[in-house]
Image (tube, grey):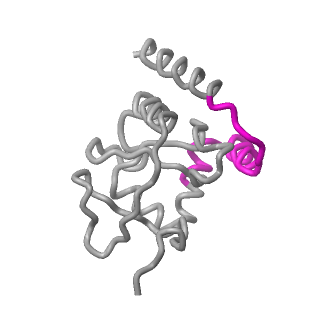
Amino acid sequence: MKRDPLDIVYSEFIAIREDNSSVEGAVRMRVKIDPLDKLASKCVKSRDKWCQRCGGTGGLQTAHFHSRRKRSVRYDLENLCLLCFGCHQYFHENPDKFKEFFKTRLGERAFDMLNSRARITQKIDKAAIGLYLKARILEIDKEE
């Protein structure tokens, strides 16, 4: 029986190769990427440079601790980190390990604040977020 992509739970890992073919046995689903997603990803890649779990440099992806569906933290840099494909898959298969990874990465207070921000449901200001991300990329590039 074919499943509707909307029925797929977030915790289920979805793997798509760079050539856009799905990995054997994986569910294939397109995620809508908006310009702010690309900008946030560029910012995270500039900041993190390599996989934050294993230190690898191949197959890097921007990972969200809280789902992109949580609009209040979708572009929040504390909610994002760079992971290689393997580590990204590992964390989706082991959500408790992902939680501990992010808690250690941010510190308990910042982690609690991120979780609080994730519960906010009001509309976000995409223009302001775009300006912030562009400024942050410039800051990161100057630090190098």
Q: Main SS of the magenta segment?
A: helix
As drawn, the residue found furthest toward the left would be 19
Residue 106 falls in image quadrant: top right
Number of numbered callouts drawn: 0
The residue range painted magenta reads 101-126
**Image location (x, y in percent) of residue 10:** 54, 65
**Image location (x, y in percent) of residue 26:** 34, 71
Above-or-below relation of 101 to 40:
below
Query: Residue drawn at (52%, 34%), measured in percent from left and top?
Result: 36
Query: Residue drawn at (53%, 49%), measured in percent from left and top?
Result: 64
Task: Tell me: 18 left or right of 89.
Answer: left
The quadrant the N terminus occupies is: bottom left
Residue 117 sits inside the magenta stretch: yes
- Viewer-nearest residue: 102 or 4: 4
Residue 90 falls in image quadrant: bottom left
Above-or-below relation of 139 to 130:
above
Above-or-below relation of 97 to 82:
below
Above-or-below relation of 112 to 133:
below
**Image location (x, y in percent) of residue 70:** 65, 51
As drawn, the residue found furthest toward the bottom would be 1
The quadrant the C terminus occupies is: top left
Residue 68 sits inside the magenta stretch: no
- Viewer-nearest residue: 111 or 31: 31
**Image location (x, y in percent) of residue 71:** 65, 46
- Viewer-nearest residue: 89 or 52: 89
As drawn, the residue found furthest toward the top would be 142
Task: Tell me: 37 left or right of 67.
Answer: left
Task: Tell me: 34 left or right of 60.
Answer: right
